[in-house]
Image (cartoon, grey):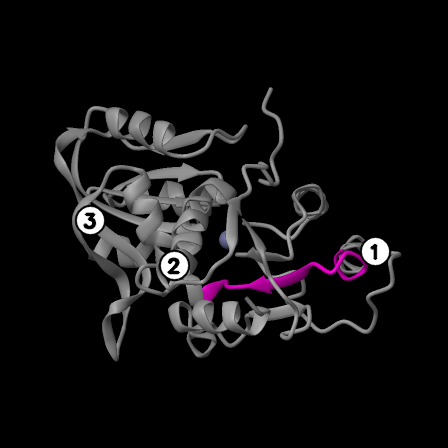
């Protein structure tokens, strides 16, 4: 299978035109004519993931986060990013990114997060595209039956891979929750949208003290803040299964290497 074929399948599921204007998605390094047998899926393009790709003899790494978001004038091996590019090219490993275009896809990053934490039935975007009600940022879904915020937080903890960040809750742990909004990755910008959607709880990552505190004080939904990496990790399996269901004959592997920025709690 050529890299070109694999990219065609990925771009049908995650159209690059749907990425944010500030984003940098698509092929970072690699030759579209290259033969691809093994594809490693990971959240972050970092050294530990490149090492895993080397050991497993991957031909392609598909990551959620871009390696370079802004222009650069050098890929010299004197910086971590330049060194990563050297490692990949020297070992014939391509790198491809599906970032905000995977966030807004259907199924996308937040669908996988919603299922991982136990939401059932139809999921609808928290912030749909004006021209497409089935695509957009975040998802709203329901729990099979009402549970307390504390029990739901425990369920989220079980459903997501373990990190030192853990799961943090803002709100009364005895509060009943049924209607849930989720958004993989940093969700600060969606706080107002979650409140307007009248959900019982909003699960996301990277929430800051002041916006979270003011949100809860103002009577908004309860908040659950998980590790950024953990909220996006469930998507990797979904992206890998898209390759398989499209008939692409490659071997896939989802990296279990925890690459969240926070590595230890005390
Ligand atoms: Zn992210």
Is the residue marked 2 within 8 Å of ligand 1, measured from its CB?
A: no
Q: Which residue is mark 2?
A: 242
Q: Which residues are magenta?
A: 88-100
For label 3, the SS is strand
Q: Which residue is mark 3?
A: 141
Q: Nearer the viewer, residue 6 or 78?
A: 6
Report, in whole angstroms, how far the alpha carbon at label 1 lies from the one at label 2. Answer: 34 Å
For label 1, the SS is loop
- Work out whether mark 1 precedes mark 2 in sequence or the reverse, and give the earlier one: 1
Q: Quadrant of residue 177?
A: top left
Q: Is residue 53 left or right of residue 152?
A: right
- Work out whether mark 3 precedes mark 1 in sequence or the reverse, and give the earlier one: 1
Residue 157 seen in the current view? yes
* Residue depicted at 46% across the width and 49% down the height: 236
The x, y position of residue 147, in whole percent, is: 16, 28
Q: Quadrant of residue 149?
A: top left
Q: Is residue 261 left or right of residue 185?
A: right
Graded by Cα atoms within 10 Å as few (under 14), some (14 to 19) or many (20 or more), the crowding at tag 3 reads many
Q: Which residue is mark 1?
A: 79
Report, in whole angstroms, how far the alpha carbon at label 3 lies from the one at label 2. Answer: 22 Å
Circles 3 and 2: CB distance less than 8 Å? Answer: no
Report, in whole angstroms, how far the alpha carbon at label 3 lies from the one at label 1. Answer: 42 Å
- Work out whether mark 3 precedes mark 2 in sequence or the reverse, and give the earlier one: 3
Q: Nearer the viewer, residue 120 or 3?
A: 3
Q: Is residue 265 above or below residue 182?
A: above
Graded by Cα atoms within 10 Å as few (under 14), some (14 to 19) or many (20 or more), the crowding at tag 2 reads some
Circles 1 and 2: CB distance less than 8 Å? Answer: no
For label 2, the SS is helix
Q: Is residue 10 above or below residue 203?
A: below
Q: Is residue 42 left or right of residue 197?
A: right
Q: Quadrant of the N terminus?
A: bottom right
């Amino acid at each position: 299978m050529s890299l070109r074929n694999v990219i065609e399948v990925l771009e049908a599921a995650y159209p690059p035109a749907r990425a944010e204007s500030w984003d940098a998605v698509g092929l970072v390094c690699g030759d579209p004519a290259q033969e691809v047998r093994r594809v490693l899926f990971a959240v972050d393009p970092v050294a530990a993931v490149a090492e895993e790709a080397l050991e497993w003899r991957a031909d392609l790494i598909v990551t959620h986060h871009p390696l370079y978001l802004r222009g650069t004038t050098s890929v010299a091996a004197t910086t971590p990013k330049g060194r990563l590019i050297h490692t990949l090219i020297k070992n014939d490993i391509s790198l491809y990114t599906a970032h905000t275009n995977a966030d807004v896809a259907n199924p996308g990053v937040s669908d996988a997060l919603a299922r991982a934490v136990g939401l059932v039935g139809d999921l609808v975007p928290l912030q749909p595209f004006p021209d497409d009600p089935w695509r957009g940022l975040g998802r709203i879904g329901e729990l099979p039956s009402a549970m307390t915020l504390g029990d739901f937080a425990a369920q989220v903890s079980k459903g997501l891979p373990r990190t030192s960040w853990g799961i943090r809750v803002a709100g009364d742990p005895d509060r009943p929750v049924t209607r849930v909004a989720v958004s993989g990755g940093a969700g600060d910008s969606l706080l107002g949208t979650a409140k307007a959607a009248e959900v019982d709880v909003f699960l996301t990552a990277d929430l800051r003290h002041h916006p979270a505190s003011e949100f809860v004080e103002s009577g908004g939904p309860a908040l659950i803040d998980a590790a950024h990496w953990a909220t996006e990790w469930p998507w990797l399996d979904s992206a890998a299964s898209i390759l398989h269901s499209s008939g692409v004959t490659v071997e896939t592997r989802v990296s279990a290497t925890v690459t969240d920025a926070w590595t230890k709690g005390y």
